[in-house]
Structure formats: C-alpha cells, structure tokens
Image: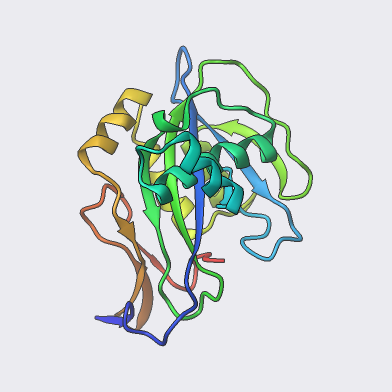
C-alpha cells in the first residue's frame, strides 16, 4: 500500500531541467550511449552516472521564443537546454536541430525527502560521427560511450552508481538494438510524468513507478535506491 505520494507536505516548485539520451549505433553489438559521471563535489547526485543535461536557464527560454516559436515554450526551452548542457559537459555539439529531438521520458519526484526537485525531460537523439567526449572537469568528471548494459554492470560491480531514474532508463534502453527501435517505442508511449512513490511490502519500503510506461523494472527496495 502507498505510504508516500502526491498528497505529502507542500514542496517548493520543481526546477525545469533536461537531459539528452544520445545514442550511437555500431556495426555489431548493442548501441552505445553518451554517459557522464557527475563531479564528486556537486550537491545533487554527486559521483553518479547520468545522461548529460541540467537545468533550463533564462537564456534557453529566450532562445526558445525566437528559434522554436511553434513548439510549446517549456518544451522548446528544454530542448535548447539539453543541447547546450551536452556541449558544455562533454564537448559534443549535437548538430541536429532542437526541433528534431524525440521526447522519450519525463521524471518528477514528489516524495518528501527530496528537497531539490527537478522536472526533467529526457530527449532521444542519434549521432553518426565518431567523436570522443571530453568531461568539463567540474559538472562532469568523466564522459564516455557505453552500452546501457555496460553501465548497469558497472553499478552492479560497485564501480559506480546511478540514481533511481537513470537506472530505470538504462534498463529500458538495454532492450533496444537500434535507434529505430527506441524511436518506435517513444512514439508508441509518449512520455508522461513519472513520479515514484513509496509502498510498504512485507515490512519493507519499496520505491515504485507505474507498470505501463515502458520500464521493465518498476520497483526497487528503498534501502538500495539512490535518489539524490
């Protein structure tokens, strides 16, 4: 039964943010994704493996009004922010127009323990250039290409960790053998807001998400879930 959810104590408004799930296909083997490891001194998710991205800035909103007038202003600003943040964190300039990014997921925590909440939109794109990412040394300490399964295996071995939304996204991405497969699912399951909740199961607390949103794993023991 749920023990935490949308009706908890009032919270501060969430911060608009965006992340880019940038894929590159290979001649053989599973596709790889651009991954960064957050700097150890950061307040949020220090040291975690994540997709590049960050908060939406006022400049992103200003550009959205000028460059993407036909797209919802919040969506447009997030698209611009995710390309900007990816370039800042990894040195990779995604040449695709922001309008071509594919909405893939959206996560927004509501549980009371999370003080700094991000309303994060995840966009999917594919790159066909062989480019080496370079971490900026501040927000990201590492930047590299890896399959979704490789990153999950690193976490399982204790060689790193990923916050709850990233783990669930990696498990979902690990099922795709191509960009076309990922795009097809994104079109079949348009992103809706995923707000995890806590349930009590046999005396243990579990962090849960809906079971019809495309994620193969929909719960994790709260004791092992890395949320922030």
Give the left or right position of residue 188, taking residue 181 as reference. Answer: left
Give the left or right position of residue 157, taking residue 24 as reference. Answer: right
Identify which residue is drawn at 54% across, 41% down.
63
Q: Quadrant of the N terminus?
A: bottom left
Q: Is residue 206 above or below residue 40?
A: below
Identify which residue is drawn at 36% across, 67% down.
196
Numbered label tally: 0
Q: Is residue 38 above or below residue 15?
A: above
Query: Considering depth in this image, is 4 or 94 the residue closer to the camera?
Result: 94
> How does the figure colour the protein chain or chains?
rainbow
Residue 201, percent from left and from top: 29, 78
Identify which residue is drawn at 46% across, 52% down.
167
Residue 90, percent from left and from top: 67, 35
Q: Is residue 148 above or below residue 159?
A: above
Query: Considering depth in this image, is 143 or 219 the residue closer to the camera?
Result: 143
Can residue 79 be seen by looking at this rendering?
no
Residue 127, percent from left and from top: 51, 21
Query: Considering depth in this image, is 81 or 168 the residue closer to the camera?
Result: 81
Give the left or right position of residue 89, taking residue 162 as reference. Answer: right
């Amino acid at each position: 039964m749920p023990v935490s959810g949308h009706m908890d104590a009032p919270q501060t408004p969430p911060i608009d943010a965006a992340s880019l799930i940038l894929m590159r296909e290979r001649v053989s083997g599973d596709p790889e994704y651009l991954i960064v490891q957050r700097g150890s001194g950061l307040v949020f998710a220090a040291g975690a493996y994540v997709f590049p991205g960050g908060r939406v800035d006022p400049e992103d909103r200003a550009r959205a009004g000028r460059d993407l007038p036909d797209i919802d202003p919040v969506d447009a600003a997030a698209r611009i922010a995710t390309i900007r943040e990816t370039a800042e964190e990894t040195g990779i300039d995604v040449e695709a127009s922001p309008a071509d990014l594919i909405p893939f997921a959206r996560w927004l925590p509501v549980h009371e323990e999370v003080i700094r909440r991000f309303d994060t939109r995840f966009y999917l794109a594919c790159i066909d250039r062989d480019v080496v990412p370079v971490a900026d040394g501040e927000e990201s300490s590492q930047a590299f290409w890896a399959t979704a399964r490789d990153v999950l295996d690193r976490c399982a071995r204790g060689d790193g960790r990923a916050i709850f939304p990233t783990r669930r996204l990696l498990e979902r991405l690990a099922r795709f053998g191509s960009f076309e497969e990922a795009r097809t699912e994104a079109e079949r399951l348009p992103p809706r807001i995923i707000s995890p909740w806590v349930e009590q199961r046999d005396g243990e607390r579990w962090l849960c998400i809906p079971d019809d949103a495309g994620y193969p794993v929909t719960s994790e023991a709260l004791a092992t879930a890395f949320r922030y």
